[in-house]
Amino acid sequence: MPFSTKFNLQNRITYFTLVACALWTLIIGTSLIWNIQHEYADTQELALSTARANFFKDQAFRLWASQKGGIYVPPSHKTQPSPYLAHLPDRDLVANDGRKLTLMNPNSMMREITEDYAELYGIKGRIVGIVTLNPKNRADPWEEKAIHAFSAGTTKEMVEDSEIDGKPYLRMIRPMTMTQDCLKCHGHLGFKVGDVRGAVGVSVPLEEYNQQAKASAINLSITHGGIWLIGLTGIAFTARRSRQRTEEREKSLDELQLSACAFENGLQAVLITDPAGVILRVNPMFSEITGFSAQEAVGKTPKILNSGRHDSEFYKTFWLHLIQDGRWDGELWNRRKNGEAFAALENISAVRGPNGDIRYFVAMFQDISERKRSHDALQRAYGENRAITEAIHDNLYMLDESGRLVWWNKRMQDVTGLSEEALRGRAGATFFIEEDRAMVQTAIRACFETGYAEVQARMITAAGPVYYHYNGVRVLDEQGHVIGITGAGRDISESKEAEARINQLNQELEQRVEERTAELLAAKLEAERANHAKSDFLSSMSHELRTPLNAILGFSQLLQFSSNLTQEELDNVDEILKGGRHLLELINEVLDLAKIEAGHLDLSLEPLDCGEIAQESLNLLQPLKERYQVSLQAILPDAQIYVLADKTRLKQVLLNLLSNAFKYNRPNGSVTLRIETVAPDKVRWIVQDTGIGIPPERQANLFQAFNRLGVDQVEIEGTGIGLVISKKVTEAMGGTIGFESAYGTGSTFWIELPCSRDSGDIAITHQQTDLAAADPSATVHTVLYVEDNTANVKLMESFIKLLPNLRLITAHNAELGLQLASAHLPDLVIMDINLPGMNGYDALHQLNAMEETRHIPVIALSANAMEKDIAKGKASGFFDYLTKPIEISLLMKAIQGALNRAE
Ligand code: ADP
């Protein structure tokens, strides 16, 4: 039943209960009020009856007394002769015995009786009138109203509730008519017989009656209250019963609905038959499983499901159980409508009536064919798995969540040599030797925490400890709870031995490598030492050669300025200069090669515009065109190509190749420079000549230092080092060098260098040195030259003589130079570096330390011409650093620059 309906029913019961209570209360209340009112009315009636009775009795007394013409009584203090009867002659009489008697009228008589015996009488009665003898009898307004009504004949009695002396009374009044007897006393007042002369009133005290009525009302209230409560209890009880009945009805309705729902929607097939086995009802699941619709099944017997797979013995047992025990459970092979047999898990019950006889059979079953198939498949798979795990050569295992062995394969048992009882429940770590157990335990923990772990440890086998590699993965149940770990262990004793052997070999190898490294280190140190020695040697050789060369070249240059020389002498000077310069070139190239070979080649690779480099190189070679009578042409690419190279070194290589092309050419020959892009990232510089070429048998000796391939015999000047340097420099810049040569026809030399995609920040500065512009001012400047070599001093003196505005003072050591500097304060100091005693650096330091000489520019002039020497000199504070042999033009330029600054 829906909740709302149920709720409404309960509400209606409550509603009816409340209405019944209200009605009951109303009935009882009405009855109580009616009864009380009735009780009070009865009381009133009783009081009225009493009043009437008294009236009639009093009236009888009065009438009797009137008829007797009043009564004579002895006068007393209280009963005095009535003044109102004074008009009667016989009012007072004297009896025979002398006693005096006076007449009393009936009214006075009654009044005295009621007054004298008020306690006994209880009821007050009196005669009243409008016209009276005695004013005491005068009617009050209510009585007067009644007398008038009586006179008019409208009523014969009037009654009212009243209060007398603060107490309740019932007053009743009736008319009194004049009779013949009344005339005696009242005739003189003008009344006639038949006139309503007045009225007689009776007052009955109601207090007692009221108390009785009140007591009755209380009794009635109690009785009614009791009845009311009993009624309410009855209503409440009825309501409760109704509620319970409603709930029970609802419950049974719910159960009915649930049963119907279970029957209709149950996942089990339900079939109900009568005791004879005739099908009465089937549910939808029955039809779904068997294929028989309800219409097809009802009226038939369960034989329609008979698969024929069970023998008569089976059915005998089946019926025996069903009749004796009232139920049968088991598997039954049934048949669907389409003839297909299916396995059903059945439960059949006999439903008995109150007298124990079978009323129905209820069969419930479910199709378990699929489950049986899965089970069979599972069994098969299990069997297969079992066979596989038995065949596997590794130890397979499974530990439960507490790390104890719960499953293993045959191999595990064979390896450990333990019985099944000994294996089951054994902690995983205890399969390993004592020293390795902590490690194994850690791995097991890690596997539980992270889901996977591996460990290599020594397992206790039947044959003793053996190295095993175990892995493990965490096993989770369907809810994701960890239920254990499983994995495999493999005997790795062989690989462990191999590993040990490899380790040993590695150690040996490492030792040998260390020894060899030590040897190589020693050799390297030796090589470095030798290299160092070689550098020192070259450096000092350079110095030693430059010093005499300074004199040779210096004086030769000076001689060129002399005007006294004959042409022949000038030619000789030229030869000296040529030889000297050749020697200088040789020294420079040898030093350069030595530096390159020592690995001291500092390159600054930057993107260079090929056209610009080519142009600069060609410009430098212009003089060679005339000298060798060879034409020069350049075939440059239209587009700008950038090459990644060190500018100075690239130019050095190009100049070497181009100058060779001139040198080894023939008169009227030609030199061609071509730049080509040979690959997206490669630029080739090609220098082609139409010269003498290289004999094929000598080509293999090219790029060997000092090997001039025989050209030295044909007096072509050269050192045989240029190409070696070019090759090394090109390769250091990431390029290659090559050549082709046809003897007698010409040679083609080329270098290939990597391209640069863009120009980068190319800052090319052109420094032009205008030697001719050296123009010493008219002022005479003093130059101090500190030099220990007399040839050099003489050379400088000869040079300065050529310049009239310069005056030279010399010092042969630094100490003297410092004295002369502070004494003469020269405009410029030219300082040698290698001086006896204090060297040039210290002298510069001293000059800078003295206030008076600090401003004087100092030019270093040294035979220390290695690059590092020049760099050191410039960094020390020299104005310029010139190397020997002196190049006159460079010296001039330096002097001019220093003097300009000094000014
Ligand atoms: P150098 O030119 O100073 O002798 P190089 O190292 O530049 O030294 O050249 C080595 C030798 O290679 C030269 O002596 C010369 O025999 C040969 N050679 C170089 N360039 C050419 C060339 N363009 N034509 C013929 N022979 C050349």
Image (spheres, rainbow, N blue to C red):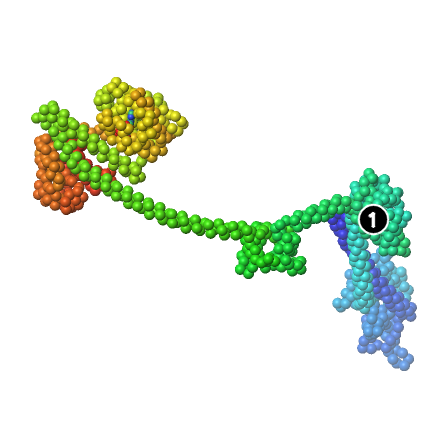
Residue drawn at x 14%, y 25% as measured from the top left = 571
In the rendered image, which quarter is residue 17 located in? bottom right
Mark 1, secondary structure of its residue: strand
Q: Nearer the viewer, residue 766 or 3?
A: 766
Whereabouts is ligand 1, in terms of quadrant? top left
Q: Is residue 899 above or below residue 492?
A: above
Give the side of residue 33 with respect to residue 740, left or right: right
Q: Is residue 462 visible?
A: yes
> Which residue is situated farthest in the bottom direction here?
97
Residue drawn at x 53%, y 52% as measured from the top left = 496
Residue drawn at x 80%, y 54% as measured from the top left = 248
Q: Position of residue 49 (x, y in %)?
A: 87, 64
Numbered label tally: 1
Q: Amino acid at mark 1?
A: Ala
Q: Nearer the viewer, residue 163 or 333?
A: 333
Q: Nearer the viewer, residue 344 or 298?
A: 344
In the rendered image, which quarter is residue 678 located in? top left
Q: Is residue 398 visible?
A: no
Q: Is residue 783 above or below residue 171?
A: above
Q: Position of residue 373 (x, y in %)?
A: 74, 45
Instruction: Please identify the quadrant where the C terminus is shown.
Output: top left
> Which residue is situated farthest in the top direction here?
668
Whether the residue carrying mark 1 lies under 8 Å from ligand 1 is answered with: no
Residue annotated with mark 1? 363
Q: Nearer the viewer, residue 331 or 531?
A: 531
Residue drawn at x 65%, y 49% as measured from the top left = 391
Q: Position of residue 874 (x, y in %)?
A: 21, 39
Q: Position of residue 374 (x, y in %)?
A: 73, 45
> Which residue is situated farthest in the front direction here?
697
Give the side of residue 203 with respect to residue 422, left or right: right
Neighbour class for label 1 at 10 Å: few (<14), some, many (≥20)? Answer: many
